[in-house]
Amino acid sequence: MSILSKQSIKKNFVFQASYEILLVALPILTSPYVSRVLGASNIGIYSYTYTIAYYFTLVAALGIKNYGNREISRCRDNKEALNQTFSGILFLHFIISSVVIIGYFIYCLSVESDYKLFFLIQSLYLFGTLFDISWLFFGLELFKTTVMRNAIIKILSVVMIFLIVKTKDDLWKYILILAVANFASQIYLWFKIKPLVKIVKVTKHDILRHFPQMLILFVPTIAVSFYNYMDKIMLGSMAGTIELGYYENAFKITTVCSSLIGSVGTVMLPRMSNVIAKGDIHASKKYIRVSMSCVIFMACAMAFGISGVANVFAPVFWGSDFSACSLLLALLAIYLPIQGFASVLRTQFLIPNRWDKQYTISLCIGAIVNVIVNFLLIPNLHSTGAVLGTIAAETSVCLTQILFVRKSLPIKLYIFKNLPFVGIGAIMFAVLRGIQYIMRTSIVLLVVQIITGVLIYLVLSLLYCFISKNEIYNIILKMIKSRKCNS
């Protein structure tokens, strides 16, 4: 009997969605306060130094999240193979991470910058990566454990920020709190692995055999970072930290949404890898079809909802100094449905089926598109140019992945079956924009817009799902029947 044979996809989605949101919830919850205390320039400095440290953590991780998740899920029914796989990946990860950490400290000591202290504090993220074994829990579909550790640590972090960060001179304290929280969350998982897996003696071959595939999956990770983080470095260098501060705040909001969308893929990756390893093609296609409907439903709601309230949200949430974020937020939301569509294709088809080459090519194309668009637009359009670069990159990735899988999956069916959610989102957007012209900009207006938007989208979406018998309608029926049986 597998360790995880009784794991529920529905429960795992709830846990993983919470996990992904909690990873970025701290900056969102504290954003109004921090924006007013630290200012746009200091937020830009934080973003700049974090982004550089983040690139070192990417090298230290070397694609381990997707690779470790997939390989653990494929051998989880065999305890001996599970121990061997975990130990081999772990030792290789330790070696690579240790080398990268040494390289980062050499960089910190050699850089001539007023930000040296901030760079040193950010090194805690690398130590967090060194001890990161979340991929083990994802591969075993034990998402609850990762959620619980983050919930406690994130709440404590929020309290510490409000207690300690009081002036613009407290930027280093803000960075330290975030970095320590990340490090502590990784250490916590080590106290939970004893009943799951053992670290066993492995040979040099057992360790090195993982390197080629990890390296292959590292390339797309770097590619993704180009249009998630490299644009911040380019924006900070070409347009200044104030423009970067605007972009950073807008990016935080859409990151929460994309994390929620991505949680579907994270939950389904180990399940799909296990199903494909058993040769159950029918089940795999069913999972993809259901996931696509759920993802597009959520993505369209968030994309059109955010765009509809952006003009009110930015000044109310961050203050009048951040009104420039309105346009950035409205534009950034556009890529959410595009990103969601591509996310299902790669996490539920390309990666589980080991189409690593196609996965890598698609993301590399996105990275190239992003850099080109950024170089062309950032000098004149500043943060708006960086946003357009992100949209162009996500679109190119999605189109490339569609091209690769078009003969294996019914892409047209996915598009036409879920296209009505785009129309429903457009109706919600029009109503939200209309409301702001009849009320004064305030928190009351924002609350009215949010409630109205939720009601419009849910009512129209459920009506469509009922008429068309969409997968979401079937899920709702099963939930209702399940509750009746339990009662």
Image: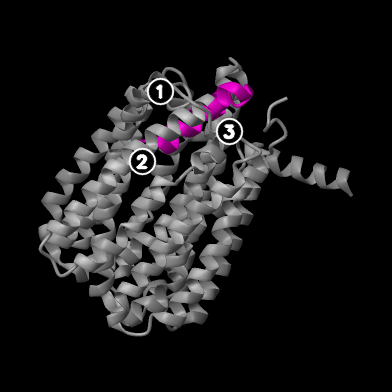
Kindly give the residue lying farthest to the front in the view shown. 201
Please report the residue visible at 43 percent of the width from the left and 26 percent of the height from the top: 350
Q: Residue 429 appears at what percent x and percent y? A: 45, 61
Q: Are marks 3 and 1 in contact (CB under 8 Å)?
A: no
Amino acid on which disc 1 is placed: Val
| Mark 2–mark 3 distance (CA, rounded to whole Å) | 21 Å
State whether residue 248 is above or below residue 313.
above
State whether residue 294 is above or below residue 37.
above
Q: Can residue 304 be seen by looking at this rendering?
A: no
Q: Nearer the viewer, mark 3 or mark 1?
A: 3
Q: Residues within 10 Å of mark 1 (few under 14, many from 20)?
A: some
Q: Nearer the viewer, mark 1 or mark 2?
A: 2
Please report the residue visible at 63 percent of the width from the left and 56 percent of the height from the top: 459
Decide whether residue 323 is among the magenta residues: no
Residue under numbered circle 2? 61
Q: Which mark is residue 85?
A: none
Please report the residue visible at 22 percent of the width from the left and 54 percent of the height from the top: 105
Residue under numbered circle 3? 198
Start and end of the magenta stretch?
62-83
| Mark 1–mark 2 distance (CA, rounded to whole Å) | 28 Å
Q: Earlier in the sequence, mark 1 or mark 2?
A: 2
Query: Magenta span: helix, strand or loop, mainly?
Result: helix
Q: Are marks 2 and 3 in contact (CB under 8 Å)?
A: no
Q: Residue 433 appears at what percent x and percent y? A: 43, 68
Residue under numbered circle 1? 405
State whether residue 260 is above or below residue 217.
below
